Image (cartoon, rainbow, N blue to C red):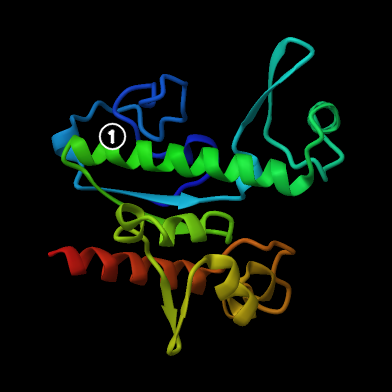
Amino acid sequence: MVCGLEKYRTLHIDPYSPSGAPTVILSYEKYSYEDIDYIIIQLSQLFRNRFYFELGGHKCHTNVSPRADYGDYKLLLKWMEDNDKTYDDWQKELSEAQYRRLVKELKFYEEKGIKTKILSWEDDLITYIKNDTFLNERFITLDYKGRTYDNIQKLQHNHKEMIIEYDYEFFGDNPPKDHHPSKLCHRVIADNIIKSIEKDI
């Protein structure tokens, strides 16, 4: 299972994650922990995860970048101004919060006997993952044509055929204007997930 966004959108056994917050359920069937061997978590864009802060005595959260021009970005900018925070300060605080959440989430499932793996869309948490033995042992890199990439975005930057917009083989002369992974990219991702799991056997 390859997913992203808030709470990493993994398959949960019940409608609440270990932190107690509601999360997306990808199946309505009932499973026990013993029914699941692996959970694969694909990290998405960092700012899609909620950033919690207080403003004017009220608890607030956003899931947008302060550089956005939509959603609650003005609240976030106000919090940054009131607390003398820079964009880098915000990014560091959000990164550290998501790093802690990721460790907690994976350990929760590992304690239930479910093996976990991580792959990443972008670069945001790679440094945290590589500097953490527990996470790094579960980190899936992407091998393609003799090179290894830490995330899907880097793979796409080096091989345009990994993007739907340039997937002429599957879509013909007019592929959709879409930056998501192409059919070939999904195959590369799947092959590397399988290879990582086979190392555990």
> Where's residue 181, x and y in %?
57, 65
Q: Residue furthest front?
A: 84
As shown in the figure, which amino acid type bears the numbered disc 1? Answer: Phe
Q: Quadrant of residue 102?
A: top left
Q: Quadrant of residue 16?
A: top left
Quadrant of the rendered structure where residue 144 is? Answer: bottom left
Picture coordinates of residue 18, whole percent (x, y): 35, 26
Asked whether residue 9 appears in the rendered view, the answer is no
Query: Which quadrant would the C terminus be assigned to in this image?
Result: bottom left
- At horizontal 43% and vertical 73% (from top left) the residue drawn is 142
Q: Position of residue 106 (x, y in %)?
A: 33, 42
Q: Nearer the viewer, residue 94 or 150?
A: 94
Residue 58 visible (yes or no): yes
Question: On screen, 51 above or below 89?
Answer: above
Q: What residue is shown with label 1?
A: 108
The crowding category of the residue bearing disc 1, from other C-alpha atoms within 10 Å (few below 14, some 14 to 19, many at least 20), is some
Number of marks drawn: 1
Q: Which structural element holds mark 1?
A: helix
Q: Looking at this rendering, what residue extends furthest in the top direction?
A: 57
